[in-house]
Amino acid sequence: MRLLPHPSVENIQLTEVLRALSDPVRLEIVLRLAAAGEMTCTVAGDALGVHKSTASHHYRMLRESGVVLTKQEGRLKYMSLRHDDLQARFPGLLDAVLAAALRIPAEAHDRV
Amino acid sequence: MRLLPHPSVENIQLTEVLRALSDPVRLEIVLRLAAAGEMTCTVAGDALGVHKSTASHHYRMLRESGVVLTKQEGRLKYMSLRHDDLQARFPGLLDAVLAAALRIPAEAHDRV
DNA sequence: CCTATAGTTGGATTGTTGTCAAACAATAAG
DNA sequence: CTTATTGTTTGACAACAATCCAACTATAGG
């Protein structure tokens, strides 16, 4: 099991987290991770409507902003929300975003 | 007293709010509004380190995303946080962002 | 009417971002 | 070793965003 480079908890930046969550595709990925816990990139990126390289780009944004943790096992990469880290750094923020996103039809994240 | 065009509560988009709050300059403006309540653009934009036209651009972003309410009285424009509207639409979100931003030195919003 | 104040708009620039396509790398499995 | 699977990287491109400057609008006050 190999861990990819991530920002430490104290280096997670508020503006970068907000920026990461402000993209509809990334928000959808985060919602899936919140609903299903750890999942591979392929599963998380299924039927997102974007090219796999675009999805890969979003995985990196989410990882580098500190929103998700990625670990590699064999040829698979498992992503999971850094829920505890984010809760420690910005209490209530992720939960508020998740609740807000869930209260709205998924198609509306982009534009109503 | 004249009101500028704003999105209605139900048309406030989560991703647009997050996007609006993800800019250090705008986040600083929002912090000032949270601390001092209603204030004019000049006061809100004082010593932000950006040109007044840039600040004006940010005021519009904040208004069009639904974060602030702007009303004109004479030649002054007063901005205030749409705290109740945001609380109704995305409960806990603004408070979590404000708390997160306050817990960090202002200079760190950009980059530590 | 003239002038100062408050803020916006338009243009230009510079940098960032989201996207796809094609090529690549790494691993698992036959 | 060969092949299929998983995901990344690189390049290209268009759209967007932050910024400044200069010009503008609108209002208040003399």
Image: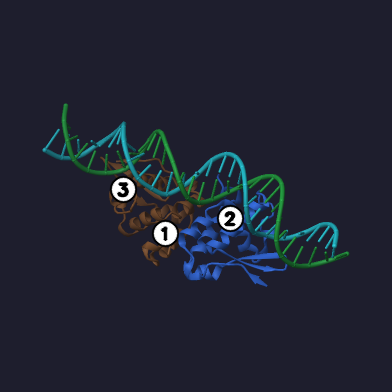
Chain colours: A brown, B blue, C cyan, D green
Nearer the observer, disc 1 or disc 3? 1
Q: Looking at the figure, which quarter contains the N terminus of chain A? A: top left
Q: Which mark is residue A110?
A: 1
Q: Which mark is residue B26?
A: 2
Kind of residue sitting beneath label 2 = Arg
Q: Residue beneath label 3, please?
A: A41
Nearer the observer, disc 1 or disc 2? 1
Callout 2 touching callout 3 (CB < 8 Å): no
Q: Closer to the camera, A59 or A87?
A: A59
Callout 1 touching callout 2 (CB < 8 Å): no
x, y (%) of residue B33?
Answer: 62, 62
Tag 3's secondary structure? Answer: helix
Kind of residue sitting beneath label 3 = Cys
Query: Could you classify mark 2 by the number of other residues whose Cα lies within 10 Å: few (under 14), some (14-19), or many (20 or more)?
Result: many
Q: Looking at the figure, which quarter contains the C terminus of chain A? A: bottom left
Q: Chain of mark 1?
A: A
Callout 1 touching callout 3 (CB < 8 Å): no
Kind of residue sitting beneath label 1 = Asp
| Mark 1–mark 3 distance (CA, rounded to whole Å) | 21 Å
Tag 2's secondary structure? Answer: helix
Residue occupying image coordinates x 42% and y 59%: A110
Q: Is residue C19 above or below residue B94?
A: above
x, y (%) of residue A21?
Answer: 44, 54
Is residue A8 visible in the rendered structure shown here?
Answer: no
